[in-house]
Image (cartoon, rainbow, N blue to C red):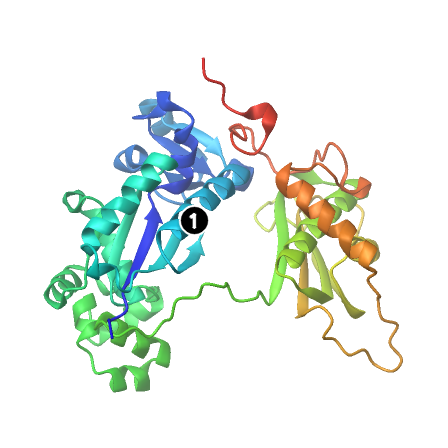
Amino acid sequence: MSQGIFALVDCNNFYASCEKLFRPDLVNTPVVVLSNNDGCVVARSKEAKKLGVKMGVPVFQVRELMQKHGILAFSSNYALYADMSQRVMSTLESMAPRVEVYSIDEAFLDLTGVEHSQSLTEFGLSIRQVIQKCIGITVCVGIAPSKTLAKLANHAAKTWHKTGGVVDLTNRDRQRKLLALLPVSEVWGIGRKLTKRLQQLGIDTALQLADADPNYIWQHFSVVVERTVRELNGESCIALEEMAPTKKQIISSRAFGERITDKQQMREAISEYISRACKKLRQEQQQAKHLTVFLRTSPFSDKDAPYSASKSLELDSPCSDTRVFLTKAMRLLDGLWVDGYRYAKAGVMLADFYDPGVYQPGLFDDPIVQKESDQALMQLMDKLNTKHANTIFFASQGAKQEWSMKRELLSPAYTTNWRELPVAK
């Protein structure tokens, strides 16, 4: 029986790469992508990294650096990134029998048996070539007998350009050579606190962690860290998950572009968040029974009086109909709203999920019965809004949404809006 082989495919500087993709004039230009309300740097092109722009730094702190070196900034274009991600993942699914989408720009592939037809390095290079040719995004590929080693192989592929963007760690000697070069903090799942504790025991490198006694690690840390030790030694302990686990809760929240002092604007914001959350709920093929609405002023502003509050309720029976949650959310907002405050953020949370049709109501419950026509209506809305953004929305969401987050540097929706498609001249 063949040993299992994993590959981690990771898009390079994904958000920045998406912004450059439809702007060939920016091929060598340093680019950064900003967080909600254009506050902090959340992505950097390789040119911006070389100039010393740090991840997460507030924009105002690097304003002079950006002007000096001509660094171009973009607001986060989530529609573009999601669409490009879907294209990358679909291409990977056509090249490998099993794929786990790990994040918007990462995926694990099952390459078991591929080594019998061609070398794993050649296959990794072909992945890079196909993604680059068909989509225009550069990826790096790490290949190994465990997910944790594949993560480290991918890190090496990104760090050392002489690898050609592909590192095969199926060889035991190559594994140990790389592990000796990497600090323990680079190991998947080893955060700051764990790093400090391990360093106190004299474990500074990934190789030293791999050579640690698994039983000792289990006794002094956890079964998760013990599993990491085994993974570092090529023992696969983390299976490929082709189906993402069902979420336990869904939160929809944003900081406002401008402070909200008008209740009607807050009603629009809460309606928008409910609409997004319920769409995600239906995508998960779930129904929710618990709803929470929260709002707050800015905890970082000396000008705003502090206020933070939330209210929750439970439905008599689970539901996924946006209209039901909109009605309930407005009632909760009435109990939360206090005049005189400048609200900086609000949001909603759906929780207590059930599979459709499996909830048993109580004797005195007044269950919400979702008619087939109601379910069909929600599905039609989701389908239209997925194909054409914001085609149909509830009047309570507002038409202008002046409260929405600030995105003054937003690039066009090159792939999801007919009116913003790039035009060849």
Which amino acid type is shown beneath numbered disc 1?
Answer: Met
Q: Residues within 10 Å of mark 1 (few under 14, many from 20)?
A: many
Mark 1 residue element: helix
Image coords of residue 95 (percent x, y): 35, 51
- Residue 26 found in image quarter: top left
**Residue for badge 1:** 89
Image coords of residue 41 (percent x, y): 42, 40
Which residue is found at the position 39% from the left and 66% from the top?
240
Horizontal side of residue 373 vs 391, given as left or right? right
Labels in figure, total = 1
Depth order, front residue of 171/160: 171
- Name the outermost residue toward the top: 425
Q: Is residue 67 above or below residue 251?
A: above
Which residue is found at the position 14% from the left and 43% from the top?
162
Image coords of residue 283 (percent x, y): 63, 56
Which quarter of the rendered picture does the N terminus lie within?
A: bottom left
Depth order, front residue of 7/277: 7
Q: In this view, does 310 lie above or below 352?
A: above
Q: Is residue 103 above or below residue 80?
A: below
Image coords of residue 220 (percent x, y): 31, 84
Horizontal side of residue 396 vs 149, given as left or right? right
Q: Is residue 158 in view?
A: no
